[in-house]
Structure formats: C-alpha cells, structure tokens
Amino acid sequence: MAEMVHLRLDSVDFSVGGLQILTDISLNSYKGDLLALIGPNGAGKTSLLNCVSGIYHPTGGRILLDDKDVGGSRAHEVAEVGIARTFQHNELFQHMTVLENLLVGRHLKIRSGTLSNGLFWGRTKREEIESREVVEKVVEFLELEKFRKTEALSLAYGLQKMVGLGRALAMEPQILLLDEPSAGMNRQEKEDLARFILRIKYEMGITMIWVEHDMQMVGDLADRIVVLNFGHKLAEGDPEDVLNDPQVIDAYLGTGAARQ
C-alpha cells in the first residue's frame, strides 16, 4: 500500500531583503511519519518550520496540507487546520501554572460567544469541560501530574520544554513541528523525550517534522531524514544512508562521525 503524503513542500523559496534563506526546497512528509530535519546552524531549518507554521510566508513554491495550499496562511489559520509547533526556546507564560499554559493551547478550539462566556453556560461550559479533559490527558501522557499547579518559572529547563510540547499536543494537531525539543536537556531528559516522541507516533499517530542536532536520537528514532545546507536540500533518505553520506558528513557531521 502506497504511503499517503500528509504535507508536501513544492519548490519552496524564502528570502528577506534580497537575502535568500531557502532555495527550491521540495519534500514529502507522510502520514504518521517522523521526519527529521537536520543541518548545520544557519542551514534554514527553523526558517522552514516558520514557513510551514505561517510565521513566515514563502516567496515562492507551495506548502500543501492534504492538497490544500497553506503557504500564504497566517499562523492562526495554519493552527486552525491542524499544524502545531514547539519552539527552540521556552515560549511559556512564566507566571502561569502548567495547567494554565496547556489550556492556552486550547484557545483556537473555543467557539463560544461573549454572553455565554460571561454566564458560563451552554456552549461555553461544554467547551471548558472538553478542554479540561484534553489537557488532563496530556498532563497524564507526559507524566506531569505533580507539576499541574506549578508555575512555569519554577520548573527546570527540561520540564519547561516538556510543557511546551504539552501545549502543542493540547491543540490535538494533525501535524506536529518540533524545533530542537532536546536542546538544553541532559541525557535522562533526552531519553524521556525520545520515549514520548515514540508514543506520540505510535499511540497518537501524529505526523511529525523534527529539527534536531542530536544525531544519536535522529538515527534511533527518525523514519526519514532531510538534510539542509545553506538553504538548499543536500540529502534525503533513510537514517542509515543519510548519516553515512559523504556529502552530509563533510557538510555537517564532521570527518569520522558516520554511524557505525
């Protein structure tokens, strides 16, 4: 059975003030796949995620979600069609609790009006109950129960990253964009993150595009890898082939860094 393309990038370009950031990037993200996006610093990885998530608008090409072009959409419109993301740095509300930060991820799901919000009845009450149920499931999934009422500011850096992941999951996305989720984590935290990424893949079936610098994690977890270098696609394929590609080793991994 042929794989189903979930997200397609078709000759995507992005430039700012005459500076070309991305050039002719084409790739397919298949439904339920974990696609790793790697490359040296400045290769354009985060810029590519920003184009997909609507923070940037491509200056050329198309970004197709199930054949619908979302390349010119605003960030909230992209979120509404089911694309959520995490960020390199913790973009949390520091004086809000873990639960409150996760509930922010439910904002786009709220459709009730001003009157019912003020009276807390009807649709407002149903949506609030549903949001609370979804958030509690995410808290349990990420094993954050004992931190539910803790302010984000009080959490260790690795836990803050997990709250950012939880907020994205609270949106119940079709596609999850992970921008260096393991950055700043120690080895134990990375092992926990790897376990949750696999659970998201196999238990939730969410398609993921994952920017990562930890090549051990990439080699162990990714279904496929795309390599960017200076805004161009350098290589694409399964982890073993890509991580042993001489061009990739020369551009990014360094001599002798190929996986044995």
Image (cartoon, helix red, strand yellow):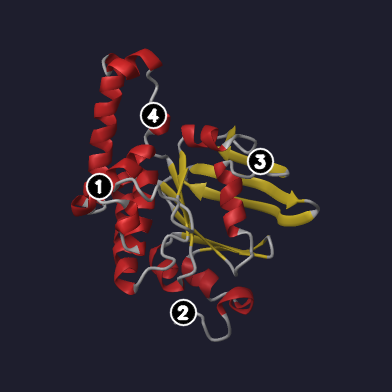
Residue placed furthest toward the left: 146
Residue 259 bears which disc, if any? 2
The numbered mark, 3 or 4, whose residue comes first in the sequence reads 3
Which residue is at 65% across, 45% downward?
Answer: 10
Q: Are marks 3 and 4 in contact (CB under 8 Å)?
A: no
The amino acid pointed to by label 1 is Val
Name the mark on residue 139: 1
Give the residue at mark 3. 62
Kindly report which numbered mark, 3 or 1, lies closer to the viewer in this rendering.
Answer: 1
Measure the C-alpha gap from mark 1 to mark 2. 35 Å
- Residue at the spot of label 4: 109
Q: In the rendering, which numbered label is found on residue 187?
A: none
Nearest-to-viewer mark from 2 and 3: 3
Q: Is residue 41 left or right of residue 183?
A: right
Near mark 2 (Cα within 10 A), the count class, few <14, some 14-19 or many ≥20, is: some
Q: Is residue 8 left or right of residue 60?
A: left
Q: CA distance from mark 4 to mark 2?
A: 44 Å
Mark 4 / mark 2, whichever is N-terminal: 4
